[in-house]
Image (spheres, helix red, strand yellow):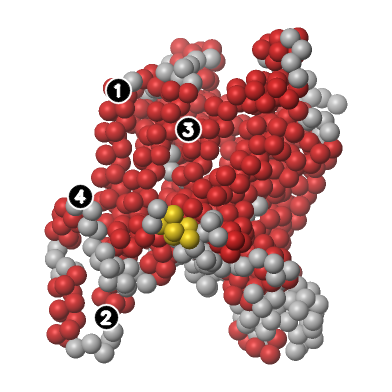
Amino acid sequence: MSVFIIRRLLQSVLVLVVMSMLVFAGVYAVGNPIDILISPDATQADRDATIRAMGLDRPMWLQYAYFVKNALAADLGKSFAFNVPAIELILERMPATLELASCAMLMAVVIGLPLGLYAGLKPKSFAGKTIMTLSIFGFSLPTFWIGLMLIMIFAVFLGVLPSNGRGATALLLGIPVSFLTWDGLRHLALPAFTLALLNIALIIRLVRSGTQEALLMDYVKFARAKGLSDARIIGVHVLKNIMIPIVTVIALQFGSVIAFAVVTETIFAWPGMGKLLIDSINVLDRPVIVAYLLIIVTLFIFINLLVDIAYSLLDPRVRLGESDS
Amino acid sequence: MEQTPFRRFLSDYCESRLAVGALIVLVVILFIAVFAPLISPQDPYDLRQLDVMDARLEPGASLGNGTIARLGTDDQGRDMLSGIFYGVRISLFVGFSATLLALLLGATVGMTAAYVGGRTDSLLMRIADIQLSFPPILIALILLALLGQGLGKIIAALVTVQWAYYARTIRGAALVERRKEYIEAAQVLALPASRIVFRHLLPNCLPPLIVIATVQMASAITLEATLSFLGLGLPITEPSLGLLIANGFNYLLSGKYWISMYPGLALLMMIVAINLVADQLRDALNPRLQK
């Protein structure tokens, strides 16, 4: 077990180093940030001073060496556009993204679990079949377009929900959050639902097939024979046994929800780190792009590691040390 | 009637009416994509045919030159229907070429891994696994943030995102097939390795690959649309469906829904049709489900 964790950690570090080099080399090659950041009216002396201040006159490998040294000290340079440290900027936006992603995941479970359970218990019923057909659509729908259509229906035609921003926030442990105010919740509804859609479909399908399999098992027959109520059989015996794959998928999907938040945040002007990335790409704000990519890659490596470990703890049948087959 | 494998496959496929319908829709979309310049009411990118006076007309309104814009016009006075026909053409082209290239790359890697085995195998599969642990949208975002816009670049990004699925699939299939007797027989006959791989191994690994390719093509098209919507995919000179939708987003809040809605519906139809076809292909190509 510990051998596995150490090996996984080493592998993670290697991935991180390779990614940092790719990211740095790529961003360096995108274009000349000087042209974008310094106004054409600036004097030559001003230009030179700015170039020196940003370290853009150094050779590329030296810039990378500085970058690694600074990255280890959690200093990824100042944003060209905002003139504040890039890491600070991203960490400041991160709570908004995490809040959106968590709400979307919660919504997916709250909606997906009961629907999937119903479809699994009554697969032949009309409602059961309808749920399954809708879940196919949930997979096929281009989510960004659904976001637009939700704005069109709820914000433009009905005018019941706001279409952009976070709304009023309240402080929770010093971090501004939206879900504690009514206005914030109203702002959260559309983006969170858009982000949840794909996962609702996923959870419905997982829970349904899990339920159908579990119902055939001997322990369910035995529980029936004991005369337990349906509610208890489903609530305790079935649910408990289908939880392992569902927990895994939720954990794994959390990462991809954060990645996909880039799209949702752009549509709903949600001030999270995904929108920051798109804005930064548009103005070629190199330090912010690099910092975002490194932070998200680190976050992912961390999530994947946790999922692997949690999986081996939850399911004793998984022998992670022998994963090479 | 004689039962050839192809006929059996055909009758298996036709068991689902929904799947046959999806296939017909797909053929129609393909027809539109190929013949877009001939059937569009207007060439949406010929500036001489556009008139700003026609901008943002409602569906069904008639243009200054008398043509009727059934789906309305966009902010440049373009007929939406023509825009969508051309958009479908570009989206399908990107999806198809990305799928084909990723399939070739992935199949080569997967086949090499399975046939050579040993350290090559574990190295290649380790790379594929690491890549699969990141969501496709994230990898594509990183690549395009670094590479910039362009038709070639978005295809490159999609291939990078998708090759690993094919590599994994074909390696799995090839490992199973390799142990079978007909491969052993071919090896005993001392056939050259290339002949064994291309004439014996590859044809028998195709069914799962075809299914994966269909599903992946749908997701390639969605991903391209998403990236173009974010302004990271195709440039404005090659307007795919995603770009049309993004363009309409600016006018959505003023109630001009058609500029975003209709291209989205076209995209949706295309993706649902491809997914339904893939679903039925999976059943029809699965020997275990044969009666």
Horizontal side of residue A83 vs B195, given as left or right = left
Dot 2 or dot 1, earlier in sequence: 1
Q: Quadrant of the N terminus of chain B?
A: top right
Please check whether the numbered discs 4 and 2 fall on a single chain: yes
Circle 2 sits on which residue? A38
Horizontal side of residue B10 vs A213, given as left or right = right
Residue B164 drawn above or below residue A93: above
Q: Quadrant of the C terminus of chain B?
A: top right
Tell me the chain of label 4. Answer: A
> Residue flagged by tag 4: what amino acid is it?
Leu
> Residue flagged by tag 1: what amino acid is it?
Ser
Considering depth in this image, is B14 or B186 the residue closer to the camera? Answer: B14
The structure residue drawn at horizontal position 44% and vertical position 54%, both measured from the top left corner, is A172
User: Label 4's element?
Assistant: helix
Dot 1 or dot 4, earlier in sequence: 1
Horizontal side of residue A264 vs A210, given as left or right = left
Given this view, does label 3 or label 1 mark the residue nearer the observer? Answer: 1
The structure residue drawn at horizontal position 76% and vertical position 28%, both measured from the top left corner, is A121
Horizontal side of residue A19 vs B35, given as left or right = left
Image location of residue B266, percent across then percent down? 70, 60
Q: Is residue B224 in view from this perspective?
A: no
Tell me the chain of label 1. Answer: A
Q: Label 2 vs label 3: CA separation?
A: 48 Å
Give the crowd class for mark 3: few <14, some 14-19, many >=20 residues within 10 Å: many
Q: Label 3 vs label 1: CA separation?
A: 28 Å
Given this view, does label 2 or label 3 mark the residue nearer the observer? Answer: 2
Residue B96 drawn above or below residue B111: below
Tell me the chain of label 2. Answer: A
Q: Count of labels shown?
A: 4
Tell me the chain of label 3. Answer: B
Considering depth in this image, is A280 or B137 the residue closer to the camera? Answer: A280
Image location of residue A242, percent across then percent down? 61, 26
